[in-house]
Amino acid sequence: MLTNQSTFAIGIDIGGTTTKFGVVNKDGKILQQNNIASNKHSDIHFFIEELYQNIQPLIENFGGNKNCVGIGIGAPNGNFYSGTIEFAPNLIWKGIIPLASLIQNKFGLKTLLTNDANAAAVGEMMYGVAKGLKHFITITLGTGVGSGIVIDGKILLGYDGFAGELGHTIIRHNGRLHKGTGALGSLESYVSASGIVATAQEFLSNDILKESLLHQYSKDELTSQIIYSSAMKGDKVAQKVFEFSGEILGEALANFVMFSSPEMIVLFGGITNAGDLLMHPTKTAMEKNLLPIFRNKVKLVFSILPASDAAILGASALVWEN
């Protein structure tokens, strides 16, 4: 049934296990959404066929292809220039996948692709707290640490399309091992969900008093959410975990500020649910490590986009912006 004849875009967010998609109008309202499994089909063509069977009826519901301005996709290791996903470690498809061209040919609609963190930055610029800004950075804090850098109103892509991997910058010389990359001391190994758990485990093993709610959980049971809940109950070790994580993040943000001089840094993702437990030490450490010419100039804020919708919004925003 035809429900709307105004123009819209399709936003697709591809994750390791789930692919979310939705119909989005230019005001950033998701008119309808759904999802399918990302890891069901090892053959990318079967995945695209299932995607088509689920998305095309939505397109028809809102007036058909003539009203759809295009399809935007956010995906791990997505390359905006080539429209390819390249060697994404957490996706079932290996090597280089020409996803944008495959989907464009299937749907007959302009299709743009970028990595998921860049899509989040575009979403913030069009619909979120960074609306109207031309110089800002988004940092996504979740399973990993992603980033999108906007300079002069444009996403920083670099010559090959992969610029802006701030989560993999080295913040501690010969520091903690990142199991996925083999790097020592990268930001992601400290302030991702698993990084926060690793910090808690280190603190617990060195805790002289041994007084912490966290001791009741096994190594496999401990999560960043449990650490947060314990910190909110007044647990000193859990609170110390967020203080330490905030200090690491703040030092890294100071480096990023002195590189690109943004007006704002937007923090997004599940870890930001810690609120002031994370924000206060992060802001303090960032300002402490900035040169005087940069101090007290950069707004450090949490995203206002709803977590469940942000990825779809960011992906769809690619089409409106390009």
Image (cartoon, rainbow, N blue to C red):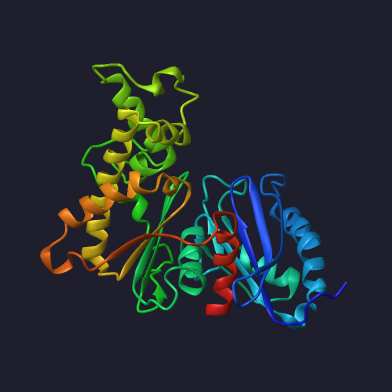
Relative depth, front residue between 37 and 136: 136
Q: Residue at x 30, y 19 (%)?
A: 205
Q: Position of residue 102 (x, y in %)?
A: 68, 66
Relative depth, front residue between 231 and 15: 231
Q: Is residue 116 in sight in this rendering?
A: yes
Quarter of the figure that contains the N terminus:
bottom right
Please, is residue 89 above or below residue 263 in the view? above
Q: Residue furthest right?
A: 1
Q: Residue at x 43, y 66 (%)?
A: 161
- Horizontal arrangement in the rendering, residue 122 relative to residue 153 (left or right): right
Please, is residue 244 above or below residue 264 in the view? above
Q: Residue furthest left?
A: 292
Relative depth, front residue between 224 and 50: 224
Relative depth, front residue between 313 and 156: 313
Q: Residue furthest front?
A: 233
- Horizontal arrangement in the rendering, residue 253 relative to residue 130 (left or right): left
Q: Position of residue 136 (x, y in %)?
A: 35, 69
Please, is residue 129 above or below residue 242 in the view? below
Please, is residue 97 above or below residue 133 in the view? above
Q: Position of residue 3 (x, y in %)?
A: 81, 74
Count of numbered badges drawn on the protein: 0
Q: Is residue 322 in sight in this rendering?
A: no
Asked where in the image residue 8 lies, by quadrant, the reply is bottom right
Asked where in the image residue 159 lies, by quadrant, the reply is bottom left
Q: Residue at x 41, y 32 (%)?
A: 227
Q: Position of residue 93 (x, y in %)?
A: 62, 49
